[in-house]
Amino acid sequence: MRALERRVKRLERELAEAQTAHERRLELVRRAANRRLAAMMKEIATLRHHEARAEMLERRLAARPDEDAAVADDLDRHPAAALVVEGTG
């Protein structure tokens, strides 16, 4: 009977140790997954920033012909303005 009780206690101790080791491994896996997720989120934020900047540049380039045409119209209407524009370039 004593041998059986000792065996049960040993098995309970081994089970507790195995559970503790499993919890440690699980926590390590969670931390690693969280680090990878944080890195992915940072990469997504960076990509969104670059995408927004590219879109802004596209809009500015698309609007450029309109701006150039407006400046040309102004120069046609006010020839003296051409002197100011030429002097600044």
Image: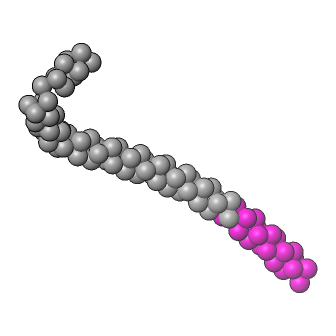
Name which quarter of the figure residue 16 lies in: bottom right
**In the rendered view of the protein, which quadrant contains the C terminus?**
top left
Q: Residue 81 location in percent, x, y? A: 19, 25
Q: Nearer the viewer, residue 63 or 39?
A: 63
Q: Position of residue 35 (x, y in %)?
A: 55, 51
As displayed, is residue 60 above or below residue 79? below
Left or right? Give the position of 68 relative to 89: left
Whether residue 59 is situated above or below residue 26 in the rendered picture: above
User: Image point 68% across, 59% down: which residue?
Assistant: 24
- Image x and y of residue 32, in percent: 56, 53
The verdict on residue 41 being magenta is no
**In front here: 66 or 75?**
75
| Residue 89 visible in rendering | no
Examine the rendered structure and indicate whether residue 37 appears above or below residue 9. above
Prevailing SS of the magenta stretch: helix
2 or 42: nearer the eye? 42
Range of the magenta residues? 1-22
Q: In the image, what residue occupies the spot 40% across and 51% down?
A: 44
At x 27% / y 18%, what residue is drawn? 88
